[in-house]
Amino acid sequence: MHAVYRRKHKYLFFFAFKFYMCGMTNSETPKNNILISNWLFSVAALVFAMIIVGAITRLTESGLSMVEWRPLIGTLPPMNEAEWNRVFEMYQQTPEFQKKNFWMGIDDFKNIFFWEWFHRFMGRFIGLAYGLPFFIFLFMKKIPSGYTLKLFGLLILGGAQGALGWYMVKSGLVNNPSVSHYRLAAHLSVAFLILCLLMWTAMSIRGIARTSQPKLYAHSWIAMGFLITTVFWGAYVAGLDAGLVYNEFPKMGNNLMPPEMWQLQPFWVNFFENIPAVQFAHRWIAMITAIVIISLTIHGAKKKSGWQFHALGTLVIVQIILGITTLLSGVWLPLAVAHQATAALLLIALTMCLYKTCAAKKRPD
């Protein structure tokens, strides 16, 4: 019975996806452009999946389990007991093991090692899924005019993201058993940037219709600015484990503002490094962002600008609910992962709103 249910919904999802993609296709779009845009949409889906895996890796505190960076020969996990012992001995020399996980045996270590290995494996797989088709399309001269440098730039940005990930991990292998929350914010932000650029480029190559609506476009950029700021502070919360304090809403203790709010000097440092203050900043920046995005949804509905704006409004309400319930649950893994995934969906939806209202340009053939 369950198998029949799963098959039924698998087919429903498949037909919904086909209908959606057909709706996004201009009848005059060249077949090469459709092929390349489908490739970019597929890579964007992989990046979205990797963002989810990255959230699991962070939330399970698995990110410091691999203490060496071997971009080429590190694809496979340890294949025998001797190799497992070698990597475990390396982990035992790290601050995380010595100060936090000194109780771990090798079987416990294998559990956290898996998620970091899988996260890096997905990075390599995405690099291959993007790089190999790119060079094939380039060799066959299939890339539309004006997009070669843009697509190559995305390839370079993806490689830089891998290096940034290792730069982040290194910060937790020296003195403190945690990575720099600034480097974590940079790593997550570049992942989101790559996701949005993939979506924008795919829509552009596909020739999806757009109409110039300057006021709505400007409103969308304001919303994007607030959303990016919220994402940054969300990464700070994650990097400092700030979600593990004051698990209540809307108050923090007996007041809206935590009593430790201003304990660091100068005062502005509190918003970046004081754990309760970072959580305070994130929760209220998020609320302001939600108001801005809801106002954008209403603006888009009045202009009858498309389903993207309705999706944006729905997602922001879901995100606020997820944020509050994640906090109240003490950062329960499924809720926290869903919270990060919805942040990525919000950025995708807002990117689509920006694209749709941007001044139309002649698409290169």
Image (spheres, helix red, strand yellow):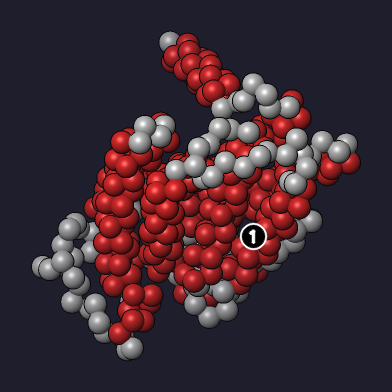
Q: Nearer the viewer, residue 226 or 301?
A: 301
Q: Quadrant of the N terminus?
A: top left
The residue indicated by pointer 1 is 161
Judge whether 121 appears above or below 210 on screen. Answer: below
Q: Position of residue 229 (x, y in %)?
A: 40, 62
Q: Position of residue 308 (x, y in %)?
A: 42, 35
Q: Nearer the viewer, residue 145 or 23?
A: 145
Q: Position of residue 209 (x, y in %)?
A: 55, 32
Residue type beneath disc 1: Gln
Counting labels gives 1
Q: Nearer the viewer, residue 210 or 118?
A: 210
Evaluate whether residue 235 shows in this view.
yes
Extreme-bottom residue of the structure: 265
Element marked by disc 1: helix
Q: Is residue 181 left or right of residue 72?
A: left
At horizontal 10% and vertical 68% (from top left) the residue drawn is 254
Q: Is residue 42 left or right of residue 315?
A: right
At horizontal 58% and vertical 44% (from top left) the residue drawn is 200
Q: Nearer the viewer, residue 303 or 325?
A: 303
Q: Position of residue 148 (x, y in %)?
A: 77, 48
